[in-house]
Structures are given as structure tokens and as C-alpha cells.
Amino acid sequence: MILYYVLFFTLFPITKQTELKYLDKVGEVSFPLDNVTGFKAFTLQYWEDFNSKKKYLCVINFPARSYNLKFYNYDTGILDFSVELNTEGPNSTGIYPLGFHVHNRDSIFIFSDREGQLSIIDQKGTVKSKHLILDTSGNKVPSGFVSTSHPMVYHDRKIYINGFFREDVLDHTKVKQDICLNLETGDFEYIIPRPKLYNDGFWGSHYLTRIYHSYNNKEESLLISFGADPNIYRYTINDLTSQAIECRSKYLGRLKPLGSKGSKHAEESKFKYEGTSGSYGAIIYDSYQELYYRIVQLPSSDSKYKFSPKLFKGTSLIIMNSQFKIIGEDLLPNEYDPYMFFVNEKGLHLANKSKYDQDEDNMVFDIFKTKVR
Amino acid sequence: MTRKFLLIILSLIISCNVKDLVIEDSLKRVLESIDSTYEFDSLVAIIIIPEGGCAGCIEKSMDFLRGHNNYFNNVLFIITGVDDKKLTRLRLNDYNLFPSQNLVIDYKNEVTKNGLLSIYPKIFYLKQGVVENIDTSLPQNTEIWIIFKKRMFNRLN
């Protein structure tokens, strides 16, 4: 089975320059790139080290000659240290170790989606333990996937990982698409059922089938977004009780499946379907401003559609307050990469690709705060 | 009735030619826009390899290119769908593909602009400026590079 990974990392929006109504650019921050590192960061995480009081932007870039988890000092912008990730030998973190979550310097979670391997390493890169998140029963189950849009969540000695699921099954509501690994026992279970709408037909193989989660550490809840669903879901993490909340984009029409369930389609027509449908993307919890953001990938018009590295017409951002009331939705200008973001006390950071194109030695993030609360 | 039939046949022939011309015009425009020393009419094949798409198909195409850099005359490889120029340069340097007389990088994404980008690498076989045949490197089409090499030997030798 051919995997279409490469395209995932090269998709950039092509919106026209637009004026932001709800977001205010309040600054920028820059991090140097060495001469073998490109723009695309597969996973990004803002992390505060409570021991040293230092604030870090942690990054794994892709593709890479070697895999390194870089720790940039957020305040100075300088690379403080990096952890080399081994892909062979006793300290191997698996093939393509691109997903991570930094809990502390002695517990860094590295995920290889190719192998379904979760490794816990320290800051020297020494593997302390490994878990295989692979179902060998032959059942059709999701496989784990970690990136900035699909972050790992740590809560109470458990790790939560988004699952990819593109299989054709009789009843999608019986498929649970998030994976919860108990770090003490090593057991894992599938949680968060897919919404009923996935029973309406075949939704392609990529963006519309995805699940995204974000963790609200204050109320201990998981916020869930599905690619095809205008609703988001708030799950209490301890008992998994849920609440559906409408969070519909004004720029997306009613999403429809590509065909009937079980129908077969050529890969190029699947890409066309993805590009001309649009989809909902990552959900982000901003604990500093008490806001939620939902990324929306906007459709290209059918008549103008031509396959391009820029699959979507553009990106918008839905902004919700702490009561999940939509404050507004902004079209993002084309220079921003909707898959490279993080939040901290200064605001929402979006990576600026145009600035990188002008200066390949730096990765620049523009910082935004909301104008309206 | 016969006249109508002939008109339909004629319009079909014209429409087929127009379609071919569109591809050739697109290829010519791409060639003119990127830095190529080749004359379109002198080329026997243009191979377009996207940076993103069917990963396995692209990998096989790149393997073929690595093994046949500066190997054929009048064959042009175009790397396109470039998102990150720095990374593309690094990757091709890693593959020891520079200097190359038959490789160009479509930094401005002229292939996309001219509607020729696909998720699959494609071989456009040419004869005196006319596209004779198009082969696509599909996952199941594993013989494509052997066939290409044979065709080039038959044509060039």
C-alpha cells in the first residue's frame, strides 16, 4: 500500500492577502535554522521548564538528514540544545521519529507512526522505555499519528494519540479514533467514537477522515474536531462524557462524501475531492487567552481545480471564547502555514513561510492576539 | 447525412489535435520559463517528477534519476512542486545530482501553473516537438523505467 506522506508536508494555502478582522498582529519571533534544515517543522511544542524557568520552542523538522529534537530558548531565539533521535540500535526511537511531547527533561515522548512505537527518552536521547501501539488482532483499527496539528496529550500517567482511520466499515460509530496508552501497564485502548456522518459514504483517505484533539488542562477535557464534522466535542477526560458544540465555518458549505460506502476511486480523484471540499482541521486550546481556535481548510472551486502542491484554496481560523461562543472567523493570509503554530502568553504564533522564502536561515512566527473578546 | 458525419469526424480530429497541442504548448511554456539549454524540438523525452504526491512512485523515479544522471542525451528531468527551495537543493546535493546536464529544478512551479502537475511522475515521449505518448509512474506500473530505458536505447542508438 502506497502511503502519501510526502504531500502532507507540502500543503500550503493560497489565499489572497486579506485584512484580519479578529486577530491583531502584535509581534514576531525568529529562530535560526542551520544550513541543513528547512522550514517545515513536523511537530512544534511550546514548553516551559519549571526547574530552569526557561521557556522553549521545541521542534522536529522534516524531512531531515538526521532526526533531532531542538530546544530553542524562546526569549533569546537561540538554540539551547538538541537531542539526537536514533533510528537504529538499542536507543532507537523507530523509523521517522517525527512526533513528540516534552513532559520534562527526563520524560520526552517520541512517536514513530511508521512503527507505532512510543519511546520515552531523556534529554541525552537514552531510551528509558518503549511501547508498541499496534493492534495485531487483524481488526480494522486506527493507527497512531502525531504532529503539531495532532499533538500527544499527557494526562495522569496516560498518553493520548490521534488515530488515522481510512478503512471501510459497516458502522463508523463503532470505531473509536483516539488512542489512550496507560504508561503504567503498557495497555492501550481506543476512545472517542467517530460521528454518525461517517456512515453517509466514502469520505476519501485524508483530511476529511481525520480526528484532531487538544487538551484543556484546567477543566481536564479533550476537545475533539473531526475533518468532516461542523461540530466539535468536549470530552471530560476522566469519564469520557461528551458534549457536542456547533463550530461551523462560514466559508465551508455542507460537506459531502466522495461516493457511497465501499466505492473505489483513483488517487487523483481523491485529491481533487479533498481540495474541492475543504475540511475542518486542528483544534487549539489557548490557555493564556482562554480561547479556542479551529483551523478550516478552504475548498478550491471545482471548475478551476488543478492538482497543485497547494491543495486547498486557503485557510481560515474560527475563534471561540471560553464558553465556546464563536467570536469570529478570519481568513488567514497566504504567508502563514496552518500546520505550524503554538500558543504562549504572548499570543497565537503562526509560522510565516514568505519570510522564510526571503531568508532561508530563519524560521519566523508572527504573533497574534484577538481584537474582540 | 454524409456531410454531417464527415463534419463530426473532422471536429473530433481537430479537437484531438487541439488537446495534444495544449500539452505541447504547456511543455514549451514550462521549458521557456525554466533555465533550460534544451530546444523543445530536439528533446526525445521530458520527465516530470513532483516533490510531493505518491511517495513510492517518486522514490522510484528519483532512484532512476540517480542511476542515470547525465546518461541520456536529449532527455530532460524536471523536478517540480517545489515548496522549500533550500530543502530541494539539499536533497539533490545529497543525491550527488549536481552538476547535471539533463536535470532542472522548477523553482517557480511553472509545471503547476501550466496544469501539468500530477501526484505521479510522468514521462512525456517526444518526437520533433510532438508528444507521442505519456507514461505515468503508478504504484502498479513497475516496469515504466525499464521500458523507458529500452525506448531510449532504441531511439538514441
Image (cartoon, coloured by chain):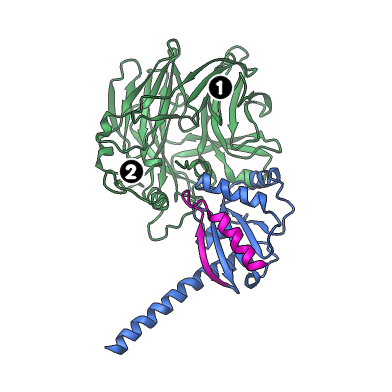
Chain colours: A green, B blue
Crowding around mark 2 (Cα neighbors within 10 Å: few <14, some 14 to 19, many 20+) is many
Q: State the residue lying farthest toward the right.
A: B99
Q: Position of residue A134 (x, y in %)?
A: 43, 24
Q: Which residue is mark 2?
A: A203
Q: Is residue B151 magenta?
A: yes
Q: Position of residue B71 (x, y in %)?
A: 70, 57
Q: Which residue is mark 1?
A: A47
- Chain letter for the residue marked with disc 1 in the picture: A
**From the viewer's perspective, is A297 left or right of A26?**
left
**Does B33 appear above or below A320?**
below
Q: Position of residue B75 (x, y in %)?
A: 65, 62
- Chain letter for the residue marked with disc 2 in the picture: A
Quadrant placement of the C terminus of chain A: top left
- Magenta segment, which residues? B130-157
Q: State the residue lying farthest toward the top.
A: A184
Q: Foreground residue, A215 or B72?
A: B72
Determine the image quadrant of residue A83: top right
Q: Tell me the amino acid under the disc marked 1.
A: Trp
Observer able to see residue A12: no
